[in-house]
Image (cartoon, rainbow, N blue to C red):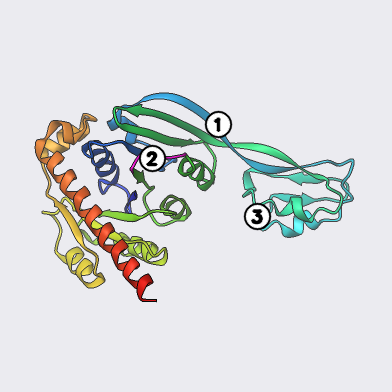
Amino acid sequence: MIISVASGKGGTGKTTLAVNLAVAADRPVALFDCDVEEPNAHLFLKPVLDHSEEVTIEVPEIDMDRCNLCGRCQEICQFNAIAVLPETVLTFPELCHGCGGCFMVCPEDAVKPGRRIVGTLEMGRRGPVRFAHGRLRIGEAMAPPLIRRIRSITVTEDLTIVDAPPGTSCPVVTSLYGTDFALLVTEPTPFGLNDLELAVGVVRKMNLPAGLVINRSDMGNGRVRQYAAGEGLPVLLEIPFDRKAAEAYARGELLVERLPQWRRMMRQLLDSILDLHEASSEKDRTCENSL
């Protein structure tokens, strides 16, 4: 089963929840930190990283000995990564999205594959938790290729937890792709509600079962709960502010190891997710049988 932990905005406690949920599971778990622009799950998990590799995408290079300057590669590129001039062709690898269209339309086979580094994949382990995260190259604008590489890792564990980037943009959709359950984390504030509505819109478009965790639940107001009820979004856990938890977090400690109640909360949360997933799967099987 793949559980993706997501939020419409940063700072809701998404990564804290993902890491502690993985450790509290007490079973072989794969934890993937897909927030490649600012990965921080490793700061709490503290895994032993034993593998690193560069992640690249294919970009065009022009063989001017074969090129006839027809301009077809420029016409198909929607991101202006190729410019055909009167006597030469310029490529801009930073703008290339790696679609491969220019390779297909060139009549002279003058477009050759080059490579551009987008970031680094690192993998390791802490106990039963196998860990992987990406580090986007400084100045790189495209996170999805690196996220896709993380998500392509072969998983042998029964449970995979994906820490998705905050927000609702392309990196988030790439992280959520293929997920069995989306766990949305929010806080009961106007900003939290606004961004939760956006996140719910994404998971609804992707047809993903979802549940809600309300962090710092004793602040703000009740509008988040009202919205969740109206959307049929189950609130699986409410976490009130706890100074001891905040202090442990600030020291980079795992809350499930410092605070016994956190281990209980995370196990109950995981059980609730598994129950919802089983109920959803049973409903789907019933619908299939009826057809």
The answer to whether residue 194 is visible is no
Report the side of 165 relative to 216 (left or right).
right
CA distance separating discs 2 and 3:
30 Å
Q: Label 3, on which residue?
A: 79
| SS assignment for the magenta stretch, majority | loop
User: Disc 1 residue type?
Assistant: Glu
Q: Closer to the observer: label 1 or label 2?
A: 2
Q: Closer to the observer: label 3 or label 1?
A: 1
Q: Which mark is residue 54?
A: 1
Report the side of 148 relative to 130 (left or right).
right
- Counting residues from the start of the chain, the first of labels 1 and 2 encountered is 2
Tell me where residue 125 appears, x and y as whole percent: 35, 28
The answer to whether residue 169 is visible is yes
Vertical order, 73 against 156 (above or below): below
Tell me where residue 275 appears, x and y as whole percent: 22, 56
Vertical order, 176 against 133 (above or below): below
Answer with the quarter of the image where residue 246 lies: top left
Answer with the quarter of the image where residue 127 lies: top left
Q: Closer to the observer: label 2 or label 3?
A: 2
Q: Does the CB distance between marks 1 and 2 fall below 8 Å?
A: no
User: Disc 3 residue type?
Assistant: Phe
Residue at horizontal 28 percent and vertical 57 percent from the top:
277
CA distance separating discs 3 and 1:
24 Å
